[in-house]
Amino acid sequence: MERTLIIAKPDAVQRGLIGEIVRRFENRGLRLIGMKFIHMSRELASRHYAIHEGKPFYEALLDYITSAPVVVMAWEGSDAITVARNTIGATRPAEAAAGTIRGDFGMEVGRNLVHGSDSVENGEKEVSLFFANDELFAWSRDTDRWIFED
Ligand code: IDP
Ligand code: MG
């Protein structure tokens, strides 16, 4: 099972899209293992987005992600990284396919609604950055056998 960190970013929360975003991942079949409502500190945001330090949009990205509360979630499943990235859509909402979250609700890259981890390794790292072990739940659903092959 892979793990991915999903964030409903400040614009998604402000626009009342928390439920819609959670629904997309639930419908897809991913299993929720952790969830919380936080206002990210600049320190935490800079750790999360360390890879983008020095890029022209970096400071604006930190301003955006720390501007208001967000919902952070950990989801797991087979191929969770790819499944979640495809559910979210391309980084630039203008280029995101219809049917994806960004393609259905977004217009601009600096207001693209959702974060999703981009690799198995980063999924593990990002989930541990935002969640303590006792905030994550190992559980199974009665529907798992109808969603996962084994
Ligand atoms: P991702 O969120 O699809 O993985 P990344 O390239 O990792 O995209 O960029 C992280 C975030 O930084 C994006 O989701 C977006 O919020 C912001 N971002 C990326 N590129 C730009 C840009 O060119 N201008 C403004 N913001 C950007
Ligand atoms: Mg990324």
Image (cartoon, grey):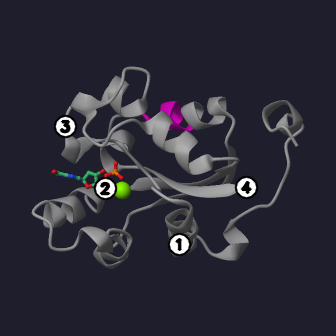
Q: Is residue 35 visible?
A: no
Secondary structure beneath label 4? loop
Residue 1 has which mark?
4
Residue drawn at the location 64% of the way across and 29% of the way down: 27
- Under mark 1, the amino acid is Lys
Quarter of the figure that contains the N terminus? bottom right
Tell me the crowding category of disc 3: few under 14, some 14 to 19, or many 20 or more residues within 10 angstroms, Cα based.
some
> Mark 4 to mark 1: distance in Å?
15 Å
Q: Nearer the viewer, mark 1 or mark 3?
A: 1
> Mark 1 to mark 3: distance in Å?
27 Å
Secondary structure beneath label 3? loop
Tell me the crowding category of disc 2: few under 14, some 14 to 19, or many 20 or more residues within 10 angstroms, Cα based.
some
Give the magenta-colored segment's residue range. 17-22
Residue placed under numbered mark 3 in the picture? 108
Q: Earlier in the sequence, mark 1 or mark 3?
A: 3
In the figure, residue 42 lies in which quadrant?
bottom left
- Under mark 3, the amino acid is Glu
